Image: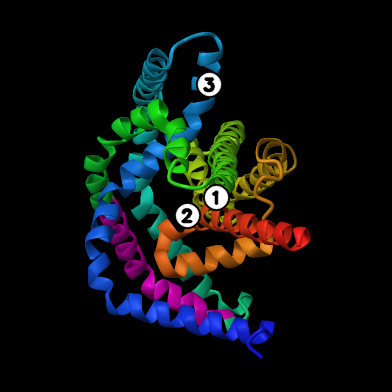
Amino acid sequence: MIHKKWFQAIVTAILLSLLILLLNQIHFFFEPVLIYLGAIAVPLIGGGILFYISRPLLITLEKYRIHRIPGILIIFLLFLFLGFLITQFIAPIAQEQFTKLVNNIPDMADMLVDTVTYWQQNQDIIPSQFNGTIENVANNLEGYLQDASKVIINVISQLIGFVFALVLIPFFLFFMLKDGDKLIPFLKQFLNDRAAKSFEKLARSIDHTLHAFILGQMTVSIVVGLLLLVGYLIIDLNYALTLALFAMIMNVIPFVGPFLAVIPAILVGLFQNPILAVWVAVITVIAQQLEGNFVSPNVMGKALNIHPLTIITLILAAGSLAGFLGLLFAIPTYAVVKTIVSHFYNQWLDRKTAE
């Protein structure tokens, strides 16, 4: 019986459960490690993202016989130049528009209250089943606005904490670009030949997956942001640059990002001119169609190959468990885990075939 697959599966499940229980009992042993990982998480992730963005440029510079250290310095200068352009030409306009938008929120809220009041006074044109919902929104509108202000203050306080960690990102990026290709050979020396080949193949696959996701998602977000900015400027939507930047950031979140990005633009369009809300929806659909049919297939290709239903499920679960950070890291984490599982599964099939 011990050779039956169902019996081995049950034993494996029991052993895994016992292992999880044991790890839970000695969680205090891992607390220093978790604290350390939490301290370096921001510079490590930030440096990793910039590493995948800048590595193609470093490889190109080396092809033109530019040594690595000068090439890295060139990349840093390009980042500084890009930061200068953003702070001089984009940030002031975005800050001005954002300030105006925040200052106009009370007027928008008053307009919404007046609209709801008008609807309540003309209940004969409103189906009775909607009266309760409208009244509830009107009564709780002030509370919603106060909650929104608390969320904004909380986000700002967290951003201030991130600033200290962001200072370390250039140092992480420098050493990643300088010594990144030495990591795999360094780890291989501790393995035998067979395990070393397997590890190198797995590491290359993970590297390819992360490269495809990070570089691809950044490219997609920038393209969508530019398309929306052009569309918003054409229809003369207020706060066009701020709304386009917000959409660009939200598009980093796969699948649900575009839906979250369009909500502020539609609300601004409704208060500016109701017909603009329709045009915002049209522009968003056009931008998403161009991105889905031309940009994503050419940038990401089939490197991730994740079904849309899987993406929805992962985002819903990760958002409930880890909030906004869960939304950001659910898909790349799943892609890496999928790559690891596929690698070992293919190895198992190769061994079975060889036998």
Most common secondary structure along the magenta stretch: helix
Give the percent coordinates (x, y) of residue 185.
47, 36
| 31 is higher (above) or lower (below) than 231 | below
Q: Quadrant of the C terminus?
A: bottom right
Q: CA distance from mark 3 to mark 2?
A: 27 Å
Give the percent coordinates (x, y) of residue 311.
61, 60
Residue at (54, 9) in percent of width and height: 64
N-term-proximal mark, 3 vs 2: 3
**Foreground mark, 1 or 2?**
1
Mark 1 and 3 residues: CB-CB less than 8 Å, in contact? no
The residue wearing badge 3 is 59
N-term-proximal mark, 1 vs 3: 3
Q: Quadrant of residue 147?
A: bottom left
Kind of element beneath mark 3 = helix
Mark 1 and 2 residues: CB-CB less than 8 Å, in contact? no
Disc ID at residue 329: 2
| 88 is higher (above) or lower (below) than 316 | above
Mark 3 and 2 residues: CB-CB less than 8 Å, in contact? no
The residue wearing badge 1 is 195
Residue 87 visible to the viewer = yes
| 22 is higher (above) or lower (below) than 260 | below
| Residues rendered magenta in the picture | 130-155
